[in-house]
Image (cartoon, rainbow, N blue to C red):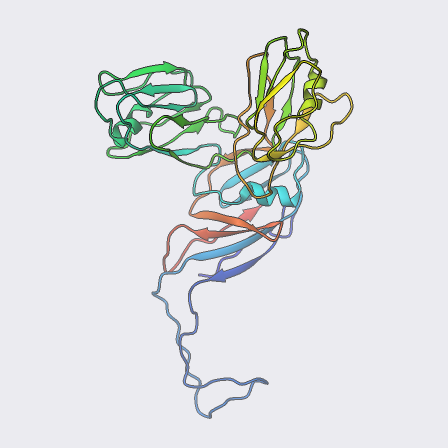
Amino acid sequence: ADTEVKNANVIGITSPTVATTRQAITSGTEMFKEGGSFLKSGSLKISTDTSTAVTEKTKVTFQALATGENVNIGGLTFTSNGGATAAELAQIFAQISDGTPGNPKVTFAALAADKSVTIAGLTLTNTTGATITAAKVAEAFSGLSNGATSGSAPAGSTWSGKFTGFNSPSYITASTSVSFVSDPLVAKASLNESTTGTALTVANTSTINPTVTFVDLASTKAITIAGLTLTNGTGATILAADVAKAFSGLVNGATSGTAAAGATWSGKFTGFSSPAYTPAATSVSFTNAPAGTYVQLNPSTTGAAITVTPKGDWSGSLVGFTAGQVVGSTSVEFSSTTAAAEVTDLVATT
């Protein structure tokens, strides 16, 4: 059940290192010593274990992609929007679960009376006077379409807001989880989940090195990037290039940037860094910081809409494997999701 990566010697992937948890040779009456001669005379006995379940592991080492090029790992394709380095690709594929990134899976908890939970802009508030079970919360957020203003919830609970950027499948009986599907199927929308009750568990929500294109920020309006908010208190419009400049040169943990006199900062810039400002630019490419962390940029504004472009777009689905953390700087090890005597090989192509 050795794992292989096919078509490895092409742009995007280099040859893999293959490993398996199975002990291929379990015993032998004869032993070799250095140089190839036997320690004992007689016949060599070798047995193999063909029934023990194994977990397949394959290490894929990435190479850079140019704009429009793609790499496919186990059925999941990433297409670069503006080029991606080998290190960025390793970050992008690291810690991806079986499924499709951009389709976050939320595991709900019971919702106590008077508490609320918000998913993609749609809020369910428990005004029933009793606890809503986790399964009922999951059912409430199932079967939703992009733009929905309510779902199916116990009588007495209330809805507010609008479900934006996602769809959700029909409810699975007894389930406490929902896998939301971004609309369209690319990692461009943020789930922006929150709750006043017990914390949610969310998987596959990473935003990798996104680029934000800013617009003019009118007086009294505000914009938030990765938790850091710039509010225009200058009394005049701040031009898009100056907004971009304000969010350039930031380090993880920053509480302010460079902005026009009269503008104010609040919050904390978390999970990203940004490069020095490029004169006249209206866009900034943010980088996950520290490298290998996976958080949402969570951009929002009370002014005109901004454009967020991910490093690339996803299609397909990773089947039968999950990805571990980055190995070195450009490699990721993939493990099969089930242990079996024979596991389908991981196939990687570009």
Q: Is residue 111 left or right of residue 41?
A: left
Q: Nearer the viewer, residue 42 or 217?
A: 217
Identify the residue at image location x=43%, y=88%. Answer: 43
User: In the rendered view, would you say 2 is above or below 13?
Assistant: below
Residue 148 screen position, x and y as percent: 38, 16
In the rendered structure, the answer to whether residue 7 lies left or right of residue 276 reads left
Judged from this view, the residue extending furthest toward the top is 235
Left or right of 174 in this view: 16: right
Which one is in front, 154 or 185? 154
Residue pictured at 59% horizontal, 45% vertical: 90
**Residue name at image x 65 percent, y 48 percent:** 10
**Quadrant of the image containing the N terminus:** bottom left
Residue 116: give x, y in percent of width and height: 34, 22
Residue 295 in sight in this render:
yes
* Residue 5 in view of the camera: no
Q: How many marks?
A: 0
Image quadrant assignment for residue 229? top right
**Image quadrant in which you'd find residue 227:** top right
* Residue 18 x/y as whole percent: 53, 60
Depicted 24 relative to depicted 13: above or below: below
In front of the other: 201 or 38: 201
